[in-house]
Amino acid sequence: MELYNSSVASNLQVKKTMFYKIFYEEFNVGFSAPSSDACNVCVLWGNRIKNERNSEKKQKLMVELRVHKIRAKAFYTHMKGNPPNSISLCFDLQQVQALPKTPIQDAFYSRQISLYNFCVVPLNSKDPWFYTWDETIAKREPTEIGSAVYDYLSSMNIDNNVDTIRLFCDGCGGQNKNNHIIHSLMQWLYSKSPAQVKEIHIFFPVRGHSFLPADRVFGRLEKELRKIPVITTKDGYHDIFKNHGNVRLLGNDWQLLEIKDLKENFKNVEGLQKIKRVWIKKTVKRQMTIGCEIKASQYYRFDGNDPWQTLLKRGKRIPLTIDVAESIPQPVSEKKKKDVINLLEKQFGEEWTALPELQWYTTILLHVTEEPAEEHEYDCVCNEEDVGEVRV
Ligand SMILES: [Zn+2]
């Protein structure tokens, strides 16, 4: 649907900004890509308010929904802000890509090998870096996410005037919003960051309102991926990613780090799942960086009167390095192997194992490995409703 047509509009006595104002403010229609899925709190509370007959309860629901929306907006206000001497980045995992990607119908019901793609990108959504791996070499847990962010921060050229790095990511506890990531950022700031960088600020959106610049990057990728019906190899995906940004392959360009080991040194931030903002700063004494401190708040418009804490456990220091994790092959279930073999036979015939480009599949599918341990679910509260705060 085209809401604004420049050839028609040129005959009108109004400017594009007027359309923008009306659509955006009156109808809540954005000109930039909106999130395709509606927020379940906004939908559910909207219905509850409509159906509630008790005026006191109705009033309470209305206040809750209003605060929820103001909070959602407050996150974006931070994201749009461009404080001096800062760099602002966002990171996110793309939807899983399937190997092999094939148009044959069985694929719809088949288990396939998952290819993961994690993106770190400045807020202007230009020059993304893609950290990619597949399920046979690593999971998608804090270790993977934290190691990729660590690599990005360590590889980045940081101007001399930059003293603050701002990070925006959605609040999925199993991946982004957990103490392992916080610990690794504290360690990086203390031991790896250039001298001019003094602080890291992290912002988490209201659930249901988490459209980030990385999603814009994924939109561009997925548009191209939709045009290509068959992608058989990892390289096939990497080539497409390369059209959009810098591709970094796990094991070649970046390594997994034992960021979970940092819990030996650091305590956890209490109640992290409710936290919306985190501040980490270097502790400096007589021009020497002697440590790191952290502060966290459940509110966007509150700078947190809580005291700074070191999070250090008794008698512990911040380690200067983090060990590189040993690479452990991740077993593929026999059921999944059977499905993938079936797809490859359908696509390439019985003799698929003889095809050089399918060699990777023969190594992961035709050897007997132990069955994977049962899928370990992180205590993720991503599906909990993000509503009920009384302050912004
Ligand atoms: Zn909402």
Image (spheres, rainbow, N blue to C red):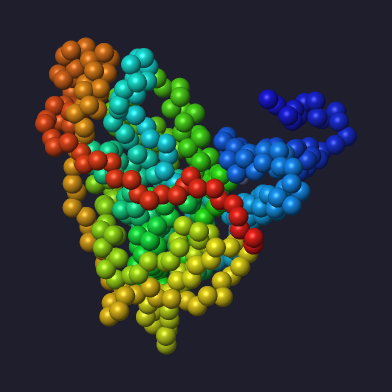
The quarter of the image that holds ligand 1 is top right
In the rendering, at what x and y percent does residue 234 appear?
Answer: 29, 32
In this picture, residue 375 sits left or right of residue 122: left
Instruction: Write the residue at 55% across / 63% down.
Output: 298
**Is residue 142 placed above or below 95 in the rendered structure?**
below
Q: Is residue 238 left or right of residue 225?
A: left
Which residue is at 42% across, 52% downward? 173
Q: Is residue 111 above or below residue 193?
A: above
How many marks on residues? 0
Q: Position of residue 216 (x, y in %)?
A: 53, 40
Q: Is residue 167 above or below residue 48?
A: below
Residue found 42% across the figure and 39% down from its top: 94
Q: Which quarter of the rendering shows the N terminus? A: top right
- Residue 95 lies in quadrant: top left
Location of residue 258 by image quarter: bottom left
From the viewer's side, name the closer residue of 121 and 44. 44
Q: Residue furthest right?
A: 13
Instruction: Locate residue 3 relative to residue 354 in the image: left or right.
Output: right
Judged from this view, the residue extending furthest toward the left is: 368
In this view, which residue lies farthest toward the front? Answer: 54
Q: Viewed as shown, does residue 45 lie left or right of 282?
A: right
x and y percentages locating residue 237 in the rendered image: 35, 31
Q: Position of residue 86 (x, y in %)?
A: 53, 63
Which of the image's four quarters has the C terminus?
bottom right
- The residue located at (42%, 59%) in the rendering is 157
Let me know if residue 228 appears in the view. yes
Asked whether residue 175 is in view, the answer is no
